[in-house]
Image (spheres, rainbow, N blue to C red):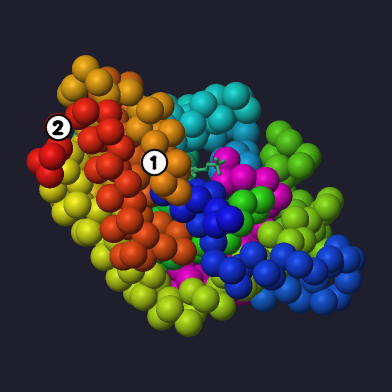
Amino acid sequence: MRDPILLTPGPLTTSLATKVAMLNDWGSWDAEFNALTAAVCRRLVAIVDGGEAFVCVPMQGSGTYAVEAAVGTLVPRDGKLLVLVNGAYGARMAKLTGTMGRELAVLDFGETRPVDPARVAAALALDPAITHVGIIHCETSTGMLNPLEEVARVVQGAGRRLIVDAMSSFAVLPLSARSIAFDAVIASSNKALEGVPGMGFVLARKEALLAAKGRSHSLSLDLHDQFAYLQSTGRWRYTPPTHVVAALAAALDQYDAEGGREGRLARYQDNCERLLAGLAELGLEPFLPRELQAPIIVTVRAPGHPNYAFQELYDRAKASGFILYPGKLTELETFRVGCIGAIGRAEIDAALAAIGQALRAMAIETTHA
Ligand SMILES: *Cc1c(COP(=O)(O)O)cnc(C)c1O
């Protein structure tokens, strides 16, 4: 039996080659596994043109663990983080910052607007205590793209440091250390890199990371300590997710074979175009205007029909082999359909057919019916 296609923002559908890479057992102290870790880290640094100035610190766990490790290690105990919020992941960065007891300021843009660089500039001018700014590149809860480059310019101009949660955009949307000033970019194995879940990583400015010794409030999430140990021994502190690292190495081979960032972006853009066109044919409306829509995940307004219930749509789509994703907006009923993963036109077209069939079975008018 075939696995369902995951139209979600991660974990997502992985290729057979990626799954097969997990069929070996690796010793965590073994030189072969250490070499694998080092090679994966080098390749991740190269994706943001990090050169010698940046290092990759892998972290066991999901993406949030890596965000928490980056904030807790890079923001000094007497520092202050301004978090730019326009969705659930921005809210999560603010929450974890508050939980660890760092000073926190929040600029909330609501769920329908991108981050406004002018408001960031004003906030930084007003509060000299702010040392760092946290931004979500693609706010996956809506699919919205934030103006990273403009915000980075504002933050740099104000002499502050930038921490970027690029979880769902990493390796797809442009993000280069040559044009964007950041101290950390955070992503994970199981999004656009198309690996399996279990590893986050932080691409950190080496100088900022080396200055952060002893800052972390946490032992297991101490990025500096993880890096120092990795550098001196070649090994992870504590048990590494060996199979996840092996799968990520295989996923990176496929990424390179596809043409790297540009190749992957082209496929995701094609997936997204077809999805938007097909949804329109079904009479379904995207939540975001076109210019704010990243080719990662599409938030769809739920049909305003009394027969509509997400759970029924979900169950019917699943019976056809597709896993949809619930909406995450507070003020509007929506559902989400991902464009990322080891999927292409055939899967998107089949998913659209399944959604159309489900809606008709629920006696919800579509323009096809
Ligand atoms: C997926 C994601 C995360 C991390 O979520 P986990 O469930 O911890 O992997 C963080 N930020 C963004 C923008 C994401 O898309």
Q: Position of residue 249 (x, y in %)?
A: 63, 71
Report the span colored magenta: 42-64
Q: Which numbered circle lies on residue 317?
A: 1
Q: In the picture, residue 170 is in which quadrant?
A: bottom left
Q: Position of residue 255 (x, y in %)?
A: 49, 74
Residue with the most extreme left position: 367
Query: Who is closer to the viewer here, 148 or 324?
Result: 324
The structure residue drawn at horizontal position 36% and vertical position 75%, both measured from the top left corner, is: 263
Callout count: 2
Q: Position of residue 89 (x, y in %)?
A: 44, 36
Query: Eyeballing the image, is 54 above or below 169?
Result: below
Three-letter code for the amino acid on which mark 2 is drawn: Glu
Res 224 seen here:
yes
Which residue is label 2 attached to?
365
- Label 1 residue SS: helix
Query: Who is closer to the viewer here, 124 or 363?
Result: 363
Three-letter code for the amino acid on which mark 1 is drawn: Ala
Residue with the most extreme top position: 306
Query: Eyeballing the image, is 305 above or below 217?
Result: above
Q: In the picture, residue 287 is in which quadrant?
A: top left
Q: CA distance from mark 2 to mark 1?
A: 17 Å
Q: Position of residue 140 (x, y in %)?
A: 38, 43
Is residue 52 covered in magenta? yes
